[in-house]
Image (cartoon, grey):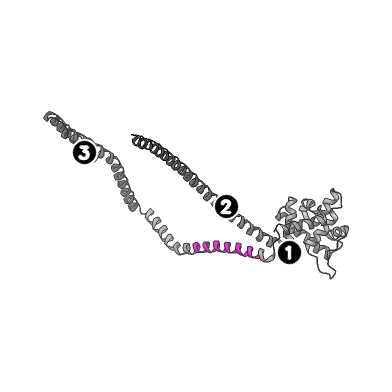
Amino acid sequence: MAGESVIGALRVVLGADTAALDKGLKDSGGKLQAFGDIAKASMAVATAAVGAAAVAIGASIKSAIDNADKVNKLSQSTGTTTEEFSKLSYAATLADISQESLGKSLGKLSKAMVSAASDAAGPAGLAFQALGINVKNTDGTLKDSSAVISEVAGKFAGYQDGAAKTALAIALFGKAGAEMIPLLNLGKEGLAASAEEAEKFGLVLDKKTTMAAEAFNDNLKKMDLIKQGLVNTITAQMLPAFEHLSEVLLESRQNSTLMNSAAETLTNIFKGLVSAAIQVPVIFSRIAAEASALWAALSAGSWDGFKKGWEAFNAEGEKTQAAMAALNG
C-alpha cells in the first residue's frame, strides 16, 4: 500500500511538473514570437534607415562635387587660386555672403586693381592710394586678388563704419561693396584665422580636385547632350514618314466620299460596341433566370412540383427569346 501511495504521489508531482513545463514552453514560445516580431520590425526600420542614409550620402556627394566645380570656375573668373577662394568662401559664408556675391566682388576688385595699375589717378587708383595699398609686387607684376583683399581688410578693420567706408568699398568691389563690409571688418588677422579653420575642417579645395569635379559634371552634361542628339537623329529619320502620313491625311480629308465611307464604318463599329455592351448583361440575366427555374423543377419533391417548375422554365425561355428579338430589332 505504501508503494502505491508513493507511486500515486509521483504521478501527481510529474503531472504538475508536466503542466508547468507545458505552460513554460508556451510562455517561451510567445516571448520568442514577440521577439521575432520586434526583430522583423527593427530590420524593416533599419533597412529603411540605411536606404535613406544612402540617398542622403549620395546627395551630399553630388552637392560637394557641384561646389568644387563652382569653386573652380569662380576662382578662374576672380583671378585667384582655388585654395585661396575656398578660404575666403568660408569666411564669406560666416559673414552671410554667398559664393556668387563673393565671386562678383573679387572680379570687381581684380578689375579695379588692373585699372589702378594702369591709371594711378583714376577712381580705383585713388581708392588704393587712400588705403596705402600698392596693387603691384616688387617685380612690377599684379598681386593676387586674395592677397590684396587681405590688405584691404587690414585697413577696413580700423576704419569707423559710415558713408565714407561704404563709398570706399563700392569703389573697390562695385555695387556689392557694401555687402562685403562685414567680411572686411574681420581684418587681416580675422581672415587668416578663418583660413586656418577652413583648412582644419577640410574645406580648402585644391586645383586637382576642383578640375576633376568640373570634368565629372561636364561628362554628365555630355551624356544628356548625346541623348538629345540620339533623339534628334531618330526624329530626322522618321520625319519623311511623318510628312507622308500628314499628306495622306490631308488628301483623305479632301476626298469627301472616302471620308463619308470611313465615318459610316466607324459609326457602325461604335453601334455594334454599344449593342454588345447592352446585350451582354441582358443575356446573362436571362440565362440566370432560366437556370434558376430549371433547378427548381429538378429539385421538386413531387410530380406536381416538377410540372410547375418545368412550366416556369419554359416561360423564362419565352421571355429570353422575346428579349433577344427586341435587342436584334
Q: Is residue 126 left or right of residue 327?
A: right
Above or below — where is 291 with respect to 164? above
The residue sitting at the bottom extreme is: 139
Checking the image for residue 325, the label placed there is 3
Where's the C terminus, which quadrant? top left
Alpha carbon separation for disc pair 3 and 1: 92 Å
Mark 1 sits on what residue? 81
User: Who's the residue at 79% across and 50% down the image?
Assistant: 182
Label located before the other in sequence (2 or 3)? 2
Above or below — where is 312 with respect to 184? above
Disc 2 vs disc 3: which is toward the camera? 2
Q: Amino acid at mark 1?
A: Thr
Disc 3 vs disc 1: Cβ atoms closer than 8 Å? no
The quarter of the picture where residue 197 lies is bottom right
Check disc 3: other Cα within 10 Å, few if <14, some if 14-19, many if 20+.
few
- Local secondary structure at mark 2: helix
Q: Amino acid at mark 2?
A: Ala
Q: Is residue 295 left or right of residue 84?
A: left
Label located before the other in sequence (3 or 1)? 1
Horizontal and vertical percent position of residue 143: 80, 65
Horizontal and vertical percent position of residue 40: 48, 47
Residue in the foreground of this view, choosing between 203 and 200? 200
The residue stretch that appears in magenta: 211-232
Disc 2 vs disc 3: Cβ atoms closer than 8 Å? no
